[in-house]
Amino acid sequence: MNDDITQLLSELQLSLNQLTTAQQSQAEKLPILNQAANSNHLLSTLSALISEGNIHRSETWAAHMSPAISTTSLLGHLIAGLHNGNLLSPQIYPILASIEQQILDWLCNVFQHQHGHFVAGSSYANLEALWQAKQQSNNANVVYASQAAHYSIAKACQILDLKLKPIATDNNDRLLPTALQQACEDQAPLAIVATAGTPTAGAIDPIANCVEISQQFNAWLHIDAAWGGALIILPEHKSLFGELSQANSICFDPHKGWQQPKPASILLYQQPLKAMLDSNVDYLEFTPSNSLPGSRGGELFLPLWLTLMGEGIDALREKIRLRLGQAESFSSQLKQRTDWEIYSSPTGIVCFHINRSVDLTLLVEQGIFSQASILGTNVYRAVFASPNTKATALIAALEPYF
Ligand SMILES: Cc1ncc(COP(=O)(O)O)c(C=O)c1O
C-alpha cells in the first residue's frame, strides 16, 4: 500500500487508540435546542458512546454477530461519508461506480452468480429475493424455509402476501430434506429458502438437497448466507456450500462475518431481474426499477473494497480462520470441563445447554453470551464474529459456574 495511505492509517489507528482507551465518561442526555450543545457535555457523551462500542473489541464479546471493525474498513467508511455520492447517478461518479462494479464482479465470481447489488442488510435482501421469486414463478404463493430460518423471511412473506410454511429441522438446526420433499409433494412452492448459517446455531442447511428439490418442483431457490457466507473464501470449507451456481439468488452480510461496518450486504442473482416498475423516473439516467434500494453510495462497499485492496484476501481468510479456531477451542474446552450439551457449527457459533439450574443471566447482561432455543431446548449462544473474541477469556468468565 502506498506510503500516504499507510501514514493515514497509522494516524487513524493512533487517534482510535486514544479514543478507545479514554476514561469512561458519563453520558448526559442532552436536549436538542436551537443552539449548539455545550461542547464539554457533548464531548463527555461522545466519549461514553465510544466506550459503549468498545464491547465489540473485547475478548469476551460473543453475544451477537457485530464484530470489531478494522482501521482499514473504518477508513473506507469515512471516505464513503466524505464522498457521499449517490450511485443512482453513476455517470457523475465514474471512480465510485467502477469500484462498485469491480467488487461486485469479484463477489459474483466468489459466490458463482451472474449479477447483483449491495443492500442495507440481509432483511432487505431476503425481501427483494422473494419479491423477484414472486414475479418470476408460476407456482402457488407458498414459500418453504426451515423453522430455524431468520425471522426476516417471515416478515418478507407477510409483506409480499406469501404463505410461509416452516420445514422441520434436525437436532443440529439443519433443515430436514425429507420434510422438504414431502411438503413439495403436497404443494409445489413458489420458492424455497435454504439458510447457510442459521441465526441461532450457525448450521448450514443441506444445500445440494435443496437444489435438487427446487429443480424437481420448479421453485426459486434463495440461499440466505447472511452469516455463513463468510466461509466461501476458505478453500477448506467450500464443500459446505455445494453448487451455489444452481441457486437463483443468494445474500451475504460482510458486516457480520467479514468484520465490515454496517450496512454492507450483497444480493446476487443468476438470471435477469424482472422490473417492478413499468415507468422511468425522468430525473434519473437509470431508474432502479428492478431492485429495492434507492439512494446508495460507497458506504455499502468502500470499507470492504479498501480491506481487500489494503490487506489482501489472505489476511481476511486468516481473520476468519482465527475466529473459527477460537470457536472450536471454546467448544472442545467446554466438552472437557463440563457435561453440558454442546451444539457446535462449522460457522463459528457454539450453543450450549446446561442441565443443572445454572443461571448465566449476569453474563448475558454483560454481552458475553446470548440466549436462544433449539427445538424447544433453551441454550446459551456464543457467536465468534470478531477476531478478538478468545476462547480462554470466555472459559474464564464461565469458571465460577463450572
Ligand atoms: C441468517 C440471517 N439472515 C438474515 C439476517 C438479517 O440480516 P440484517 O440484520 O443484516 O438485516 C440475519 C441477521 O442476523 C441472519 O442471521
Image: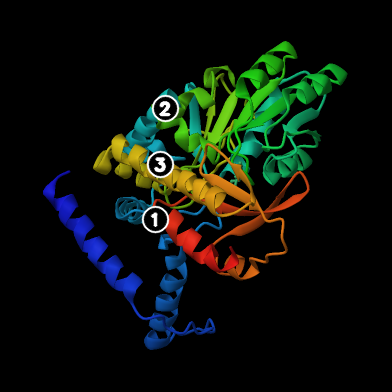
Report how far apart the C-alphas of labels 3 and 1 lie in the structure.
Answer: 11 Å
Q: Amino acid at mark 1?
A: Asn
**Residue at x-position 53% and y-position 26%:** 240
> Where does label 2 land, which residue?
236
The relative height of residue 209 versus residue 42 in the rendered view (above or below) is above
Q: Earlier in the sequence, mark 3 or mark 2?
A: 2
Report how far apart the C-alphas of labels 2 and 1 lie in the structure.
Answer: 22 Å
Q: Nearer the viewer, mark 3 or mark 2?
A: 2
Report how far apart the C-alphas of labels 3 and 2 lie in the structure.
Answer: 12 Å
Query: In terms of depth relative to the viewer, which is nearer, 43 or 216?
Result: 216
> Where does label 3 land, which residue?
320
**Residue at x-position 38% and y-position 87%:** 40
Q: Is residue 156 visible?
A: yes
Label 2, ligand 1: CB separation under 8 Å: no
Q: Earlier in the sequence, mark 2 or mark 1?
A: 2
Q: Amino acid at mark 3?
A: Ile
In the image: residue 170, left or right of residue 95: right
Q: Quadrant of residue 175?
A: top right
> Where does label 1 land, which residue?
388
Q: Amino acid at mark 2?
A: Glu
Q: Earlier in the sequence, mark 3 or mark 1?
A: 3
User: Label 2's element?
Assistant: helix
Residue at the far top in the pictured view: 216
